Amino acid sequence: MKNIYGFILALLVCNAARAQKFVPQIKAGTEMDYTVSLGGQKVGFALTVSSMGDSLKMKWEVADYGSGNYLMGAKSLQSGKGMYLQSPQPDQNVKLAETETIAFISKNSFNDMTQKQTMEFGDLKYVLDKADKAPIRVADQDLDVLHMVATNGKTELWILNNPDFPLICKTKNGSYGVDLTLDYIK
């Protein structure tokens, strides 16, 4: 009988651990691979965090096209209000404007989202959607994400619930018809 109780307890602990959502730690060396969809075409887009601190440097790479770097200053990381959406140019170091980020939202936007349940990003106002949606899965784990919906009802963002690096994990009906889906992070 003790064995049955022990087995049931172990099963419950395993299920509780499996139900917890995953928040990967993002640091120098972290690799993220996205599928970018635009006009029915899909392309792989890899980002690697080269360095981080007061500023951030990320290397990007697209197979059979090239690679380059994005550079973001402290102001971008803290208060950027929109995502840089220009096509990457090989062998370029692109310094983003103080108002722009790439692949994540700023810390101020994350704070607005979690505290006020609304934020402005990329000329749109978003509200937190608390309805349980299909999970964002990476490496067979559900990511802990916050789902934001534009007040116009079109654009949706799924953002990693990580105040230090609120990564955009997925977009739907994104600006200029560009959508991102995070395929892996390691």
Image: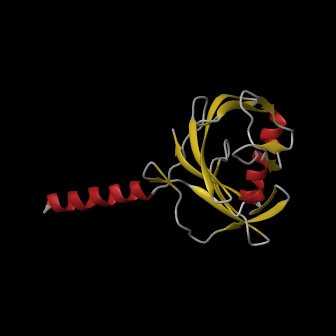
Residue 49 as seen in the image, left or right of residue 70 = left
- In the displayed structure, 67 sits above or below 125; it is above
Q: Toward the viewer: 34 or 63?
A: 63
Horizontal relation, residue 139 to residue 32: left or right: left
Report how many numbered discs are placed on residues in the image.
0
The percent coordinates of residue 31 (x first, y second) are: 56, 36
Residue name at image x 83 percent, y 50 percent? 81
Q: Is residue 38 something that shows in the picture?
A: yes
- Residue that appears at 82% across and 62% down: 124
Nearer to the camera, 94 or 121? 94
Q: What residue is rendered at 24% in x and 62% in y?
A: 8
Residue 57 in view, yes or no: no
Q: Is residue 71 above or below residue 117?
A: above
Instruction: Name the image colouring.
Output: secondary structure
In this rendering, position of residue 44 left or right of residue 9:
right
Closest to the observer: 86 or 118?
86
**Residue 185 against residue 41 in the figure, above or below:** above
Residue 110 position in % (x across, y down): 73, 52
Asked whether 12 or 61 is in front, the reply is 61
Quadrant containing the N terminus in the rendered view: bottom left
